[in-house]
Image (tube, helix red, strand yellow):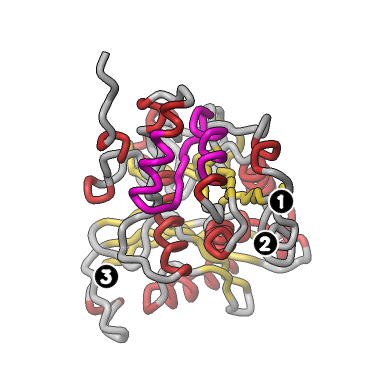
Amino acid sequence: MREILAELLEAVGAGRKVAYTALVETRGSTPQKAGAAMLVFEDGSQTGTLGGGCVEAEVKRRALQVLDQGQAELLSFKLDSDYGWDDGLICGGRMTMLVDPIRSPDDLGYFKIFTELLGRGSGCTEAIVLDAEKAGGGQPADRFLFDDSGTQMASRGSDSPATAVAGSLQPLAVRRRPYIADGASFMPQLERFRLLIVGAGHVGQRVADLAASVGFDVWVVDDRAEYCNPERFPTAKRLLVGPIDSALSGLEIGENTFCVIVTRGHNHDEEALYHLVETPARYVGMIGSRRKIKLIFEDLLGEGISREVLSRVHAPLGFEIGSQSVPEIAISIVAELIAIRNLEELSEVYQRVSLIEELKAPVE
């Protein structure tokens, strides 16, 4: 979304007309879920996608008309033979699209505040009125922005949302995916998370590239400058070169930090886990065989780390997808990071019992 908004601001600031389109409601089977966004320019070009196919073509056609008329509207599509036959995609679901024309720099106030909120990294929620009667007022396509504390920061259309809309807003920690309530679509934009990768080898490099592409701010720690450098990690926000012990000691690790331990050896893994396992990090994961992980757990128990704390560690890290190669391992790791970030609770398929449970507790 940040990239879409940046291009919108640049284009309109340069005098181009743009139609902002977004998928704000889905029902049943659809090729995209709510939250997808696309810009349509007056020359017919686009940035982003709403799922492709006939629906996207129809949205573009209508967006060009709306650019001339200057009034935001909602479009509804039923994915039957009318919108799927050409590509063999007949999902049977329903999609509701917002089409909002931005015709001059005077229309950019809402989008500038939206960009500012995303830049803070703390998350925000956009509410779009779908049914004014259920919402208790306003007009369809009215939009409102709330910061992570629930304070209204901007509006487009009506100045203030109906009481029902404001009252249906859920905290980001509770509702992390789009939802419908009281005639409005609520579109959470999640807070930015830092991913701390300890180990700049092949796996760490691949994880960094993938994680940056899905919205993590990547930091990398390694004691080897020939591995931990901008050439190998061009998307990293920060590179820390030095002994793992000193690099991690005192490093800021908060609730919005994910930690992945993928060093080149047993001792380095254990050292990193010792420093990270008792932090408030949202996620701590460590690569390795079951045997190695148990040995490290036993050592840390001997160092006074509690069983309860060690049970939080995702080890072996990543989803079980039969990974063999480095790219496959990286995909399995980043898939787990995305799931932990985006979902309120992991599916039972991906829930695992910690290996700490396989170590005998001391007899008192």
The magenta span reads 269-298
Mark 1: which secondary structure?
strand
The reply to whether residue 339 is visible in this rendering is: no
Outermost residue toward the right in this view: 14
Q: Which mark is residue 39?
A: none
Q: State the residue position of label 2.
A: 233
User: Looking at the picture, which amino acid does disc 1 mark?
Assistant: Leu
Q: Secondary structure at mark 2?
A: loop
> Considering depth in this image, is 298 or 89 the residue closer to the camera?
298
Q: Residue at x 45, y 45 (%)?
A: 285
Looking at the image, the residue that sits furthest to the top is 364
Q: Position of residue 90 (x, y in %)?
A: 23, 75
Mark before the other along the chain sequence, 2 or 3: 3
Tag 3: amino acid: Leu
Of residue 145 and residue 4, the one placed in the foreground of this image is 4
> Answer yes or no: do the residues labelled 2 and 1 have beta carbons within 8 Å?
yes
* Marks 3 & 1, CB-CB < 8 Å contact: no
Comparing marks 3 and 1, which lies closer to the viewer?
1
Which residue carries the number 1 mark?
Answer: 239
* Residue kind at label 2, given as amino acid type: Phe
Find residue 79 and name its label: 3
Where is residue 128 drawn, in percent x and y?
Answer: 45, 45
